[in-house]
Image (cartoon, helix red, strand yellow):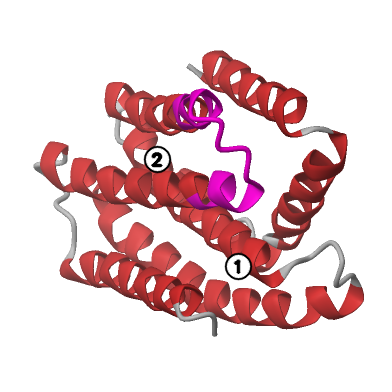
C-alpha cells in the first residue's frame, strides 16, 4: 500500500509538472514545500507518539487520538495565521495569499488524516487504513486528469480541488473510524474537532468568494 501510494504521488506530481509547465510548477512546489517544512509546528512528532501509545494500549487510542487532534487543531490555527501573515511579506511574488491559504488547509487536513490513519493502523484496521491512504492518492490523480481533459490549466483551481479532496478524505476517515471501530467509537470531542475544521473551511471559502 505504501509503495502504491508513493507511486500515485509521484505520478500526480510528474503529470502536474509536465502539464502546467516549469514556472507554474515551481510556484506550486515552493508553496507546498513551505507548508510541509513548517508543518512541524503542527505535528511536533505527535503521530509517532500516537503510534507508540496506541500500539502499547489499543483501548486508550480514543483518548490519545482526541488529545492529538486537539493539540494539532490549536497549533494548526496558530501556524496557519503566522504562515499566512508572514510568508507573503518575504516573497510576495511567490507566496500568493489565495494559493497559500489553500495549501495551508490542504497540509493541515492531511496532518489530521494521518493521525486517524495511525489509529486505524495500530488497532489492526489495516484494510481501512489502506483504503484511506489510497482513496486520497487516487482522488488527487483522478481530479488532475479530469482537469486536464477539461483543459482547466489553472493553478488556483488545481490546488482548490486538491484541498477539497483532502477535506473529504479527512471526513471519510473520521466516519470510517466511527463506523468500523465498534470497541473504540469516535468520541464526541473528536467529532466536535472535525466540525470546527469544516466550519473554518467554510469561513475561508466565503472570504475567498467575497475577495476579503
Q: Which quarter of the figure has residue 70? A: bottom left
Q: Residue at x 44, y 63 (%)?
A: 68
Q: Tell me the magenta residue range.
A: 142-160
Q: In this orientation, does residue 56 appear?
A: no
- Circle 1 residue: 101
Residue 139 relative to residue 83: left or right: left
The mark tally for this picture is: 2
Say which label, 2 or 1, has the lower sequence index.
1
Which residue extends farthest front? Answer: 151
Residue 21 visible: yes
> Label for residue 184?
none
Determine if the magenta segment contains residue 162.
no
Tell me, yes or no, whether the two marked residues, 2 and 1, touch with CB atoms within 8 Å: no
Question: Which residue position is annotated with label 2?
Answer: 117
In percent of the image, x 33 and y 25: which residue is there? 131
- Few, some or many residues within 10 Å of mark 2 (<14, 14–19, 20+): many
Question: Helix, strand or loop at disc 2?
Answer: helix
Q: Is residue 194 left or right of residue 78?
A: left
Q: Is residue 51 above or below residue 112?
A: above
- Report x, y in % for residue 47: 53, 51
Q: Position of residue 207 (x, y in %)?
A: 47, 80
Q: Residue 175's spot in the image, x, y percent?
A: 19, 47
Q: Nearer the viewer, residue 175 or 14?
A: 14
Amino acid at each position: 500500500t505504501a509503495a502504491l501510494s508513493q507511486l500515485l504521488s509521484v505520478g500526480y506530481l510528474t503529470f502536474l509538472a509536465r502539464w502546467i509547465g516549469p514556472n507554474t510548477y515551481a510556484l506550486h512546489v515552493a508553496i507546498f514545500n513551505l507548508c510541509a517544512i513548517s508543518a512541524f509546528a503542527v505535528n511536533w512528532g505527535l503521530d509517532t507518539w500516537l503510534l507508540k501509545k496506541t500500539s502499547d494500549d489499543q483501548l486508550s487510542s480514543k483518548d490519545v487520538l482526541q488529545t492529538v487532534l486537539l493539540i494539532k487543531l490549536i497549533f494548526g490555527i496558530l501556524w496557519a495565521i503566522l504562515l499566512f501573515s508572514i510568508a507573503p511579506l518575504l516573497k510576495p511574488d511567490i507566496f500568493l495569499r489565495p494559493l497559500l491559504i489553500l495549501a495551508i488547509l490542504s497540509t493541515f487536513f492531511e496532518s489530521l488524516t494521518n493521525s486517524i490513519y495511525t489509529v486505524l493502523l495500530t488497532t489492526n484496521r489495516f484494510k481501512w487504513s489502506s483504503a484511506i491512504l489510497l482513496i486520497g492518492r487516487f482522488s488527487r490523480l483522478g481530479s488532475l486528469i479530469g482537469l486536464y481533459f477539461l483543459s482547466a490549466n489553472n493553478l488556483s483551481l488545481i490546488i482548490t480541488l486538491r484541498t477539497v479532496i483532502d477535506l473529504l478524505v479527512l471526513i471519510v476517515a473520521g466516519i470510517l473510524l466511527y463506523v468500523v471501530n465498534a470497541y473504540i467509537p469516535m468520541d464526541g470531542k473528536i467529532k466536535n474537532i472535525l466540525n470546527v475544521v469544516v466550519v473554518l473551511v467554510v469561513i475561508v471559502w466565503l472570504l475567498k468568494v467575497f475577495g476579503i
